[in-house]
Image: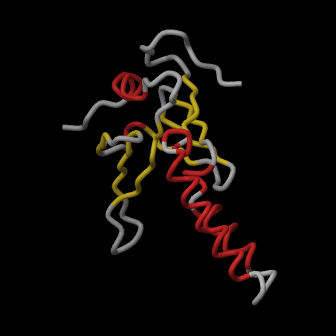
């Protein structure tokens, strides 16, 4: 399903695809959160049987990037993330101001001027557990602006 090259390094012209899923990296936390949500829904069932499912569904959909896999595609122009719970997001490499390395993956920071209080737009890029090479992909595509 994923068209991933076999080598751990990629060229800039190559289209690279991978999937990242934070729940797979930290399943105990996901089971704990889901268990708490189910307990709260069970406690609310007698009071309102149609609000109890919302107690589970709304947090799952809002935090869908954690509970469902995200598919990434890096090209020479930019990176695109597609996910079941939000519209596809794309960022051009020349718009990326900063890359922040974190334990579950990488954060791409794009400065925005759309709102008075907004400082930046952030896109999480999750590592693939099978072939951890997001750092190599980003190093081949993105160059810091001087």
- In the drawing, does residue 99 fall left or right of residue 74? left
Which residue is nearer to you in this view: 132 or 113?
132
Task: Say whether residue 2 is left or right of residue 134.
Answer: right
120 over 72 or under it: above or below: below
Q: Residue at x 44, y 25 (%)?
A: 132
38 lies above or below 45:
above
Q: Farthest left residue? A: 146
Viewer-closest of 131 and 119: 131
Question: Looking at this view, is 73 or 51 the one in front?
Answer: 51
The vertical placement of 11 against 99, above or below, is above
Residue 31 locus on image (x, y percent): 58, 53
- Counting from the top left corner in percent of width and height, residue 134 is at 42, 29
Q: Is residue 63 above or below residue 56?
A: above
- How is the structure coloured here? secondary structure
Outermost residue on the right side: it is: 49
Query: Residue shown at 41%/67% (left/top)?
Result: 114
Residue at point 41% right, 57% down?
Answer: 121
Q: Quadrant of the C terminus?
A: top left
């Amino acid at each position: 399903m994923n068209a991933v090259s076999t080598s751990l390094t990629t060229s800039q012209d190559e289209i690279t695809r991978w999937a990242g899923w934070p729940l797979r990296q930290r399943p105990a936390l996901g089971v704990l959160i889901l268990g708490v949500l189910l307990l709260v829904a069970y406690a609310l069932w007698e009071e309102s049987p149609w609000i109890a499912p919302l107690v589970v569904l709304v947090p799952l959909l809002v935090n869908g990037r954690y509970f469902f896999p995200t598919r990434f595609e890096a090209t020479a122009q930019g990176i695109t993330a597609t996910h079941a719970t939000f519209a596809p997001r794309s960022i051009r490499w020349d718009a990326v101001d900063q890359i922040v390395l974190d334990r579950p993956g990488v954060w791409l920071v794009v400065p925005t001027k759309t709102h008075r209080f907004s400082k930046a737009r952030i896109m999480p890029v999750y590592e693939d557990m099978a072939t951890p090479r997001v750092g190599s992909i980003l190093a081949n595509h993105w160059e810091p602006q001087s």
